Image (cartoon, rainbow, N blue to C red):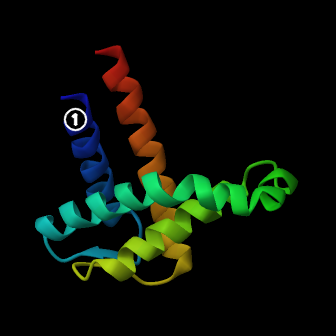
């Protein structure tokens, strides 16, 4: 049940990012659902390997390069899902930050409940 609530929070965060971030457009709610699923899978599969590969950059930037890795995964999810459009890397960067912050907040609230 917790995973379902977590995914629904992730989906809601994607919808909010589409409303807040200029350059991100969602063509349908189903497309946003698929995008959230693809982005979540990419994060689970690729985030830690990419972090290990770029570990020197992560260390030199005091962890800020992790935001770039997350933006890359957001952009990659955009390329895999046709129902969501991200105009460029700047929109992907801002969108991934919005989704991550909202997702963190949702997880925080779920732990309190």
Q: Secondary structure at mark 1?
A: helix
Check disc 1: other Cα within 10 Å, few if <14, some if 14-19, many if 20+: few
Residue 39 visible in this rendered orientation of the protein: yes
- Residue found at x 35% / y 15%: 112
Where is residue 5? Give x, y as percent.
22, 35
Q: Is residue 59 left or right of residue 96?
A: right
- Number of numbered discs on residues: 1
Rendered view: 64 above or below 113: below
- Residue found at x 32% / y 65%: 18
43 or 85, nearer to the observer: 43
Where is residue 51? Give x, y as percent.
66, 56
Rendered view: 75 above or below 110: below
Where is residue 68? Give x, y as percent.
63, 64
Outermost residue, top side: 112
Q: Quadrant of the N terminus?
A: top left
Q: Is residue 58 left or right of residue 24?
A: right
The part of the image, by quadrant, that contains residue 17 is bottom left
Q: Is residue 42 left or right of residue 46?
A: left
- Residue found at x 59% / y 52%: 48
- Residue found at x 56% / y 75%: 90
Rendered view: 32 above or below 89: above
Q: Is residue 11 left or right of residue 75?
A: left
Residue 93 visible in this rendered orientation of the protein: no
47 or 13, nearer to the observer: 47
The part of the image, by quadrant, that contains residue 43 is bottom left
Q: Quadrant of the C terminus?
A: top left
Rendered view: 7 above or below 18: above
Q: Which residue was labeled with disc 1?
A: 5
Where is residue 78? Give x, y as percent.
37, 76
């Amino acid at each position: 049940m917790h995973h379902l609530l977590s995914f629904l929070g992730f989906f809601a965060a994607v919808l909010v990012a589409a409303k807040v971030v200029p350059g991100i457009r969602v063509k349908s709610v189903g497309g946003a659902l698929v995008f959230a699923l693809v982005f979540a899978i990419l994060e689970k599969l690729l985030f830690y390997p990419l972090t290990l590969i770029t570990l020197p950059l992560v260390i030199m930037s005091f962890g800020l390069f992790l935001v770039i890795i997350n933006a890359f995964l957001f952009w990659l999810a955009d390329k895999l899902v046709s129902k969501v459009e991200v105009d460029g890397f700047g929109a992907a960067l801002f969108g991934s930050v919005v989704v991550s912050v909202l997702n963190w907040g949702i997880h925080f609230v779920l732990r309190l409940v």
